[in-house]
Amino acid sequence: MTKIIIAIVFFITSLVSAQGQFEQGMGKAFQLWGEGKNTEASALFERIAAAEKTSWLPNYYVALVNTTTAFGTKDKEQINLLLTKAQNALDVELIKAPNNPELLVMQAMIHTAWIAYDPMTNGQKLSGTVMGLYAKAEAIAPENPRVVFGKAEFEIGGAKFWGKDTKPMCVQIEKAIGLFATFKPETAFSPKWGLERAEAALKNCK
Amino acid sequence: MKTFLSIALFFCSIISFSQTTISGKIVDEKNKPVPNANIYIDGTYDGATSDDKGDFSFITTAVGNQNLVISALSFETKSLPIVVENFKNQTLQLKPSSTQLNEVLITAGTMESGGKSRVSVLKPLDILTTAGNPGDIVSAFKTLPGTQVVGESGKLFVRGGEANETQTFVDGIRVAQPYLQTANNVPTRSTFSAMLFKGTTFSTGGYSAEYGEALSSVLLMNTIDEPDLEKTDVGVMSVGASLGNTQKWKNNSLSVNTSYINLQPYQTLLPDNIEWIKPYESFGGETVFRQKLDRGLLKFYASYTAANFDLKQDDVNYPDKLRTQNKNNNLYSNLSYKGGFGDNWNIFAGISFAKSRNSGIFDVYNYDASENASHLKLKLIKPISDKIKTSFGVDYFYTNFSELVTNFKSGYNSNILAAYSETDFFIASNLVAKVGFRFSKNYLLNENSIAPRLALAYKVAKNQQFSMAYGTFEQAPKNDYLKYSTNLKAEKAQHYILNYEFNKDKQVFKAEIYYKSYDNLVKYDTKSPVYSSNFSNNGTGYAKGLELYWRDNKNIKNLEYWISYSYIDTERNYANFPNQATPSFVADHTASLVTKYWIQDWRSQIGATYTFSSGRPYNNPNETVFMDGKTKTYNNLSVNWAYLISPQKILFFSVTNVAGIKNVYGYNYANTPNSAGIYESQAIVPTADRFFFVGFFWTISKDKKTNQLENL
């Protein structure tokens, strides 16, 4: 009996310590990212992704870190490499969960980065796909602030191009800001970013 | 019991506290340090990022046999079995990832559009935003080096070869009749609309053993694998209307595209120099169905066009205008499957069926010609190792041609079986060789042959490479000859190509020199090929030239442009030539400048294409030397304007030959001299000096973003 109890205790401890390791690792990666060490952060997320095959979060962050890095990079070749890396990481998770709205938003962001990379070629090719992704995400999670904000932000780009009124999108951004306040991430490491960007975008509206 | 517990705890703490330091250095193939590589023990969190010197070091609690993973941008991820305790200060070499810009590719003779190639010389958009001949998928390729301006034909003439020496393939399967039927000296168009295609490769020589029955060139067009979204396209044009629709389901999708063209209103408004009894009218459609399968993709493509016209043209040999009445219909369909199976094998299988019929009246003769053609193809690809990739396959071509001209019947049945094999050797990361051969058995001509192919590419620097190609190419003689005589052999050509390519940041430069020799060209001894002609394979010829291409989307904001230049020196002794001479479709110098300028404030793309070619030879029977005449130079400036009214509505204008320059393609001479003993001549000129086109294109889709700019 005691043996069994010990075995169970032992098993639970090891589980807990593993759990602790995940939290520690993710925490450390976020810390690196916060310090602007994007390569190290991406590398750590990648390691965690390799160890924790059941969580979609590490790969999601590999994609997010590399995509946001690409947005701030000038070297075309480097952008290409970063976005390819982001896409590869995202692909791993999108196959497992094709209807996860956060992953769909991430895919839309990668495509948006490709459009910024070469608007003449990719604008025509990917705009429709991006809108399709947001439409799908919106149908699944209409209250997700990143879905609402991402869609509105992308639409603003189009409206500016066409010299059209951006008011309806600004209303959506306001709605997104409201949703950020009430949005409850599923876990401590689930995506919760976007409020600052939405606030900045709203400022541009006025 | 207590003892057990303490032992267990002790053991446990040993495990968690036994730490080993792993260290080493990451380098590339040239032993230069690789910074920012991610090195870790698979399945653990233990790892590090390499520093600027490529050095790394980290502490791990893992023990024994583990896998060390090294991943870095632009390198292949490496997985290495290690024994943790023994791993110290090792230098690890990474291989550049082959999907990157540093990949060495055989590009001699090839020009790609769209697709995944890094050296796209044309983007999918270019196919139709190139001012000149709006809507024709083939016309954009005529602005590339290696092609001739043959305005009276509208077909692709490549490197001294006739139009029939270029074969067109859709999804890898041959298209027997890629062009629409027209009258003498009235330019034709291809039967394809750009809507359904994506990624086209145009090879002006030295192509793979996979493609046979082509003497000079192949045009490889691929249909879209997966459409982006469901939509309906509506187009209203000055010459007709078009309607398209795409539907998507979970694992399959269907696109249909139809068009109706009628030149009656245009001809009434702006008559050209042809007397139309019934202006050109056509109805056509294309469809693609795609089905995703477990490990592959099944596609069905079909196109159908029915057209008719009736006209009268001046002809120097006839006192009255010469009548051509034509009704034609052209059906082409193919079914193809590509996918993977077993251990890393790739398979491609396809079959096509084509049926075309041409009937009408020419002068006082009734004619009725029909062709049924089929192509079966099977191809297997297998990477033997990292360094060697091999592919092999078989082709079967069937053609049945018959023609009835006022009760005189001619025709033939042709069966050709071919097998080919090709192997890529990646000798080094900057050197690749492709070796192959094609065996062909033509049952009609009772002839077997083997054609070798060889190609090499050598990357001298990150953005620069040289490639070369050599090959023997064959093609059965064309319908015009085979219908009268099958006592012939296949025509042969040898290509030697040397190519240099520079590619950096939206700039592409290509330079190519080539030499071609022709053998077994068909000769005959009459004015035109007739049943009583004496046909032989005694014809020969050569072509050599230099071609340059420069594309720049970088240096001037909102402007894309490319420049092509071709120089060719070619002579042939073929057809009914009395001696070796430059054929009439060849100009020594050809140049094109294509520009596209985006004006954001107007939401407009303005395009202009300027084409120049030096004079073309023609034969003047009043002179003693054969083919001694030269036309004046050819100049054409065409412009277009695409205006985006709203995200889904586009207005499109284009004018071909804005300045109305009077171009002359050549001269026809009378068969017999007039009373003064002189052969009278007639200039071959464009049917109209200018051509105007106006179109309105509307896309209806759920996202309200997509438009047809891509298709204009």
Image (spheres, coloured by chain):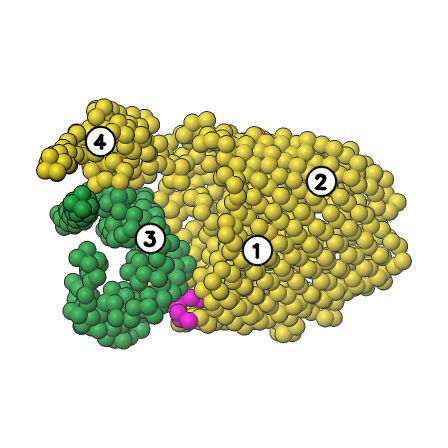
Q: Position of residue B537 (x, y in %)?
A: 78, 35
Which quadrant holds the N terminus of chain B? top left
Tell me: residue B498, above or below residue B267.
above
Name the disc covering residue B63, or none: 4
- Mark closer to the chain start, 4 or 1: 4
Disc 3 from disc 4: Cα separation? 30 Å
Q: Nearer the viewer, mark 3 or mark 4?
A: 4
- Does the segment drawn in magenta span residue B705? yes
Question: In the rendered structure, which amino acid carries the disc numbered 3?
Answer: Glu
Q: What residue is shown with label 2?
A: B417
| Label 4 SS | loop
Label 1 – label 2 distance at C-alpha: 24 Å
Q: Main secondary structure of the magenta part?
A: loop
| The residue stretch that appears in magenta | B702-707
In the figure, residue B366 lies in which quadrant? bottom right
The image position of residue B557, as x and y in percent, is 33, 54
Chain letter, colour green? A
x 48%, y 57%: residue: B226
In contact (CB < 8 Å): disc 1 and disc 2: no
Q: Are marks 1 and 3 on the same chain?
A: no
Chain designation of label 3: A
- Please give the letter of the chain rendered in yellow: B
**Subunit of mark 1?**
B
Disc number at residue A93?
3
Mark 4 or mark 2: whose residue is earlier in sequence: 4
Chain letter belonging to callout 4: B
Circles 1 and 3: CB atoms closer than 8 Å? no
